Image (tube, rainbow, N blue to C red):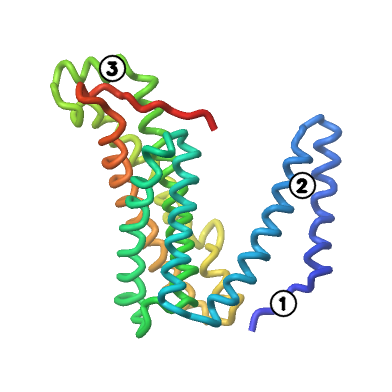
């Protein structure tokens, strides 16, 4: 059983932010208001999610669990579109599909064949694992999609030259495509190389705090990291492929209008 944290003790942790605020004031770093807002919003969101998850875990309905996953996918899709300054009306449903299909398939594969659950939609496993996969999918897609379209914008003349030479849109943007995929998956590869040496990963730490033996926690962590690498790789490929269908005109020229955030 994990040792609980009392609410007064949790509030006491805010004391460590006082020196941060004082240093910000001394050096005229104007982030105290933003920092207070971010911490307050984070705490409120997590408390509300905690109450909601407690209800979902007690209910443990496959339908409700799946609807919750759909909601998470939609929020992640909208966040990606906004962060990448893509036109929301044109792209949000495309990104929803490129997030939803790989993550749902990975969840069924992971719960059914790796963990070997009788109930593939068991809330205790389904929702936390989906959250980890989606969080990494979100991060990887923001990096990769931004990289791809930023480089197409900044190297427009080079893209047009390659397009004239090759006559193929795919060949013309392939160097930017490859670079975008690498930028998306490289952070995960770097974390895989140092996992356990530099820091204990979150899932493993949580399981150990929850009372699991270290070797069980390690096996779960290995499994989830491989799943994260795969889902991040497949999703960035799918997102770039699907969004590029809408991003170019009939002459293979980039027509995507980036929106200011």
Residue 249 location, x and y as percent? Answer: 25, 25
**Mark before the other along the chain sequence, 3 or 1:** 1
Specify the label residue 55 is tagged with: none
Query: Is the C-beta separation of discs 3 and 1 under 8 Å?
Result: no
Specify the label residue 158 is tagged with: 3
Quadrant position of residue 117: bottom left
Label 3, label 1: how many angstroms apart (C-alpha)? 58 Å
Please state if 44 lies on the left or on the right of 6 as rendered.
left
**Mark before the other along the chain sequence, 2 or 3:** 2
Tell me which residue sits at (79%, 70%) in the image.
7
Label 2, label 3: how many angstroms apart (C-alpha)? 45 Å
Residue 84 to residue 71: above or below: above
Count the marks: 3
Residue 81 location, x and y as percent? Answer: 44, 41
Tell me which residue sits at (77%, 32%) in the image.
29
Question: How many C-alpha atoms fall within 10 Å of the one at disc 1: few (<14), some, or many (≥20)?
Answer: few
Viewer-proximal residue, 256 or 159?
256
Tell me which residue sits at (34%, 81%) in the image.
116
Residue 156 to residue 35: above or below: above
**Secondary element at image label 1:** loop
Viewer-proximal residue, 98 or 39?
98
**Secondary element at image label 3:** helix
Label 1, label 2: how many angstroms apart (C-alpha)? 25 Å
Quarter of the C terminus within the rendering: top right
Viewer-nearest of discs 1 and 2: 2
Question: How many C-alpha atoms fall within 10 Å of the one at disc 2: few (<14), some, or many (≥20)?
Answer: few
- Provide the residue designation for mark 1: 4
Residue 227 to residue 95: above or below: below
- Provide the residue designation for mark 2: 36
Please state if 80 lies on the left or on the right of 246 as rendered.
right
Viewer-nearest of discs 2 and 3: 2
Residue 69 location, x and y as percent? Answer: 44, 64
């Amino acid at each position: 059983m994990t040792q609980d944290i009392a609410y007064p003790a949790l509030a006491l942790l805010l004391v460590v932010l006082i020196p941060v605020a004082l240093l910000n004031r001394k050096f005229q770093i104007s982030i105290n208001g933003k920092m207070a807002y971010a911490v307050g919003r984070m705490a409120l969101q997590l408390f509300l999610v905690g109450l909601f998850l407690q209800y979902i875990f007690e209910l443990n309905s496959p339908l409700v669990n799946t609807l919750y996953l759909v909601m998470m996918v939609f929020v992640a899709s909208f966040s990606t579109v906004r962060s990448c300054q893509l036109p929301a009306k044109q792209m949000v449903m495309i990104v929803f599909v490129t997030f939803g299909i790989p993550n749902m398939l990975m969840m069924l594969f992971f719960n059914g064949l790796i963990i070997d659950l009788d109930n593939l939609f068991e809330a205790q496993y389904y929702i936390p694992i989906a959250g980890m996969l989606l969080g990494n999918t979100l991060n990887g897609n923001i990096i990769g999609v931004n990289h791809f379209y930023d480089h197409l914008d900044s190297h427009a003349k080079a893209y047009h030259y390659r397009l004239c030479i090759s006559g193929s849109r795919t060949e013309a943007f392939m160097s930017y495509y490859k670079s975008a995929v690498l930028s998306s998956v490289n952070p995960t590869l770097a974390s895989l190389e140092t996992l356990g040496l530099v820091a204990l990963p979150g899932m493993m730490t949580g399981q150990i705090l929850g009372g699991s033996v270290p070797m069980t926690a390690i096996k779960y962590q290995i499994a989830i990291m491989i799943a994260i690498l795969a889902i991040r790789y497949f999703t960035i490929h799918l997102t770039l492929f699907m969004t590029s269908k809408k991003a170019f005109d009939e002459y293979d020229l980039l027509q995507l209008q980036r929106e200011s955030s």
